[in-house]
Image (cartoon, grey):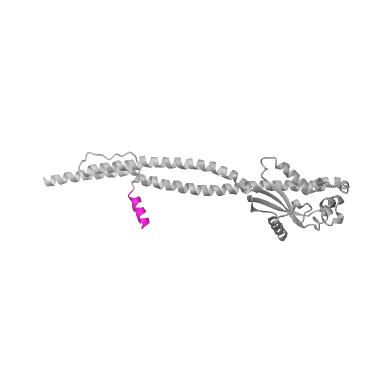
Amino acid sequence: MLKNIKLINFNHLKLASKLTLVLFCVFIGGMLLSGTALSSLLNYRTENEITSKALMLIQTMSSVRNYTSNQVKPELLDKLETKFLPESVPAYSAREVFENFRADPTYNNFFYKEATLNPTNLRDKADAFETEIIQRFRQSRDLKELKGFRSSKNGNIFYIARPLRISKDSCLQCHSVANRAPKSMIKLYGATNGFGWKLNEIVGAQIISVPASKVFQSARESFIVTMGIVLGVFALATFIVNFWLKHAVVQPLTRMAQVAEVISKGDLKAEFQKLSNDEVGQLAEAFTRMKTSFALAMRRLKKQQN
């Protein structure tokens, strides 16, 4: 019943109103479709950009770890027996270098952690979510990367993680058994945590995280600007089409209807004006021929009556 009422109301509208209504519906539909597609595209592009930056940072931190392990630590071995130097620990060096990265506004929203199941420094202890990531790396040895979103008390966080594997025997000097570790390290951290590691074992994960609101902030800004432009273009196109249809179709048809009304009352002096060569112009020609035929019929009728 409601559909029939709406249909009747639409059918009773004038052509200009119908055209305006149709163009308005096309405008709204186009904006909704464009907005949905653009939002998905911008979010996808932004996530890829964040992922690329995060992977670059992880690779950089891995290089720092290798440099510390191969170049710095061998030079400090003699001093470690009397004084523990955190600069000799790859994880410490990577963390410090990353903090320097965060001084740059481009990376100040990124956070780095070498989440470890059994770390020497409990600061690096993996939480429940990070432990789950590490276990997934352990279960799937071919899995090289994980990324996604996690919830926290401060909101959603986008993360990307790579496994942290013991690939060098030099790492086991401090993490296999307490007897092999430097005495200065045992004195500082104790002989309970950070031991029992094995070669080629995945003991943790390098995790880069950034608040989800920061991930999509640039996407939202781009969306607003782009949709503003699209809105303006759609609105202008709708106005131009509506204006053209009224002047090229509606107004000529209205004039022809008025002339036809006058002729129907017997005034054969009224003329149908052909203003174009399109279908509207052809209709004007057809009405002119019809008027001529009507005039001839009227003359014949009068002659027969006389």
Q: Position of residue 108 (x, y in %)?
A: 67, 43
Viewer-proximal residue, 32 or 181?
181
With 179 as the anchor, is 279 left or right in this view?
A: left
Viewer-proximal residue, 295 or 29?
29
Viewer-proximal residue, 259 or 282?
259
Q: Position of residue 158 (x, y in %)?
A: 64, 50
Viewer-proximal residue, 38 or 273?
38
With 252 as the anchor, is 193 left or right in this view?
A: right
Quadrant of the frame with the N terminus: bottom left
Name the residue at 34% across, 51% down: 9
Specify whether residue 231 is painted magenta.
no
204 over 273 or under it: above or below:
below
Count how many numbered circles sit on residues in the image: 0
Q: Position of residue 4 (x, y in %)?
A: 35, 56
Q: Residue furthest bottom?
A: 139
Quadrant of the frame with the C terminus: top left
Name the residue at 67% across, 49% down: 209
Q: What kind of secondary structure does the magenta stretch mostly adopt?
A: helix
Q: Position of residue 116 (x, y in %)?
A: 75, 54
Specify whether residue 5 is painted magenta.
yes
Identify the magenta region. 1-12
